[in-house]
Amino acid sequence: VTISRPLAGILILAAVIVGIVAGSWLFGVIAAPAVPLG
Amino acid sequence: MASTSDRAGVSGRSLAMAVIGYAGLAMCITLVFLGMRAVMDVGGACADGGPYVSAQHCPEGSTLALLGGVFGGFGFGALASIGGAGIGGIWVGAPVFAWIGLFGSLGWNFLDYGVFSAPTGAGVDGTWVFCGLLFWAMAAGGLLVLVPLARSPKFAPGSSSTVTLRGPGQARRSSVVMTGGSPVTVSRDGHTVVFSTTTVDGDIPDGLRDRLETLQHQLATARASGQTEASREELGEIAADFGAAIGAALAEIPVAPEARATILTAGGAIGAPAGGTPPGHAAAPGVDAAPGPTTAPGSDGAPGPEFTEGSQALLDRLERLADMRDRGLLGPDEYEVAKARIMTALEGRS
């Protein structure tokens, strides 16, 4: 299977956006709201 | 030159690795970014565990996010690097992208908490501003690496092609580094002519290498221009020139005469023609089918039977072309062009 380079670039950029969204979601899952000092 | 236009693309495997790697890298950097903000929300320092009483516990999940993000980033970064190397161009720079993304985002955190989100009445926190500017300077340093990386012909898409010539049981004899190529493999009887995407320095004279690079670039450009009648003709001519240059390369490197003969015939008589035939009629693998004896310049001058282009040899080549087409080494259009030339040559002999 071969994919054109421009399409490959678009797919990678889309993957980066998906990764950022996934990271935000994952942090929301594992982290609780911060408790400030004092 | 046996190739189809889609072979100039990206392999699915490389793309899959790059997509997963870059996505994972972005996810890990996001985790570190958010984990750091969580820690800065509690004053910028925290501690958990150990025999001491912590003045400030770490926000729940921040330790996991930071550690997971850092170590996961290494793994996904490696994956993105491997996949990106298969794609070429700017995508080989996954570690540089990660560097810029990490230090850029963390630098923003310092600046945000030091200036924009500083506690009410606390004023600007000079220490954090300094850290933020320092991190941004480090991110900018990554840009200084990325820009030349993107412009480097060594990493240009489709570049770094290599011609490798081997005989049976022989180690690689030599290779030619070219740009703008796409992977093509022509193989027969253990003798191999390989156009791969691996960069290997060869001992081909610079002048010849430059010519091969130019021809390869022209070939790639002609391929990219589509399959119109004019471009097919242009493709054939360039491929023929390319074949002549490969023949010259063969003459320059120490390949055994037997291997040389087999390489020339296996590749569709790659090489400059003898006997006063114009150089443009030298054949490239499967594209040109110029009749008449061919040999590599600088060979012993006594063409063996492999160089004789009788009607049977032309028929053999026709069969070989069909085989290359069936194996996907030759596009349908390229096959038709090559077949038409062989038929013309055959008619000229009858």
Image (tube, helix red, strand yellow):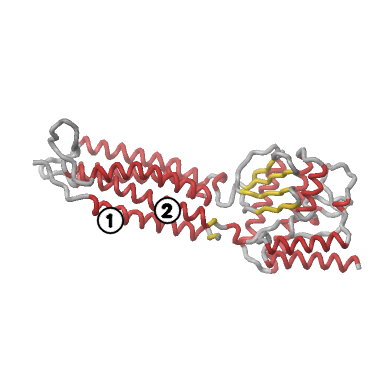
Task: State the residue in front, B202 or A29.
Answer: A29
Quadrant where the image shows the C terminus of chain B: bottom right
Horizontal side of B151 relative to B277 (left or right) equals: left
SS assignment at label 1? helix
Give above or below for A11 relative to B336: above
Residue B17, given in percent of the width and then of the height, sits at 47, 52
Residue B181, given in percent of the width and then of the height, sits at 63, 52
Residue B348, given in percent of the width and then of the height, sits at 88, 66
SS assignment at label 2? helix
Q: Read off the residue under disc 2.
A: B20
- Amino acid at circle 2: Ile
Which residue is at a point 54% across and 46% down the rendered structure image? B155
- Location of residue B114 (image quadrant): top left
Q: Can residue B24 be seen in this view?
A: yes
Circle number at residue B222: none
Residue B124, given in percent of the width and then of the height, sits at 17, 40
- Amino acid at circle 1: Trp
Horizontal side of B232 relative to B259 (left or right) equals: left
Most extreme residue toward the left, as rendered? A38
